[in-house]
Amino acid sequence: MKKLDGMPQPDGAYLVKTTFDINIEPIDENIKLWGEYSEKLSKYKFFEQELKDESEKSTQAWVQMKREFENKMQASTSMEKRDSIIEWERAEQDRIDSENQQIATRHFAKLKEAGLTTFDSSGNEIFRKQGQIFDRQCPIRNTLGKTLIFKAVPLLDSANKRVEILGNGGLTSFSYDIKMIKTENGWQLNF
């Protein structure tokens, strides 16, 4: 812990701006949860990228079809020709819609086959489980270290990173304001 600054508060407390470096040692259960989550996340991202790539091709086909429709309509001079162009455009739209439905169906089938239809890719669900495990197994109760873990880890930019650090361990640094209050025994932390 390193003090950066401090400031008296109107309520008589003292706010201390600090930075912390916390080295997290993973718990076996959290290591297992991280491994399972990481493996599923890799598969899930692969399928999502596949879906994105196929959807982009479909979008490009739709844009191309609309351009072609506009060009044909502008070049057309007869009503009969315009009617056939409109029919062509409807048929192309139906074909593209059908392809989009097939893409979505294939994507869902792949997720289902991999057991990922209910997978929470955000990592929030796994992070909650890891937090409960950490809370049960952490021998430190109601202390600065435990409080900081629950303050520091959520500051990571995504739940994926939170799941990783609780499952993989490592060093995390963050800034935090600690409120101190004056008691009969001197200044104490007030969380």
Image: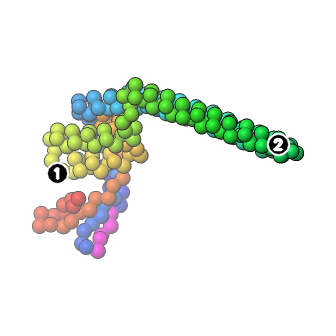
Does 20 sit above or below residue 89? Answer: below
**Mark 2 Cα within 10 Å, few/some/many (few <14, many 20+)?**
few
Task: Give, as a single range, the part of the protein colored magenta.
Answer: 6-10
Q: Is residue 62 visible?
A: no
Question: Closer to us: mark 2 or mark 1?
Answer: 2
Where does label 1 land, which residue?
142
Which of these two is toward me, 45 or 119?
A: 119
Where does label 2 land, which residue?
80
Which of these two is toward me, 163 or 138?
A: 163
Which of these two is toward me, 54 or 105?
A: 105
* Residue that lies at the very extreme toward the top in this rendered image: 113
SS at mark 1? loop
Pointer 2 or 1: first along the chain: 2
Corner quadrant of residue 24: top left
* Residue that lies at the very extreme toward the front in this rendered image: 80
SS at mark 2? helix
Q: Is residue 109 magenta?
A: no
The circle on residue 126 is: none
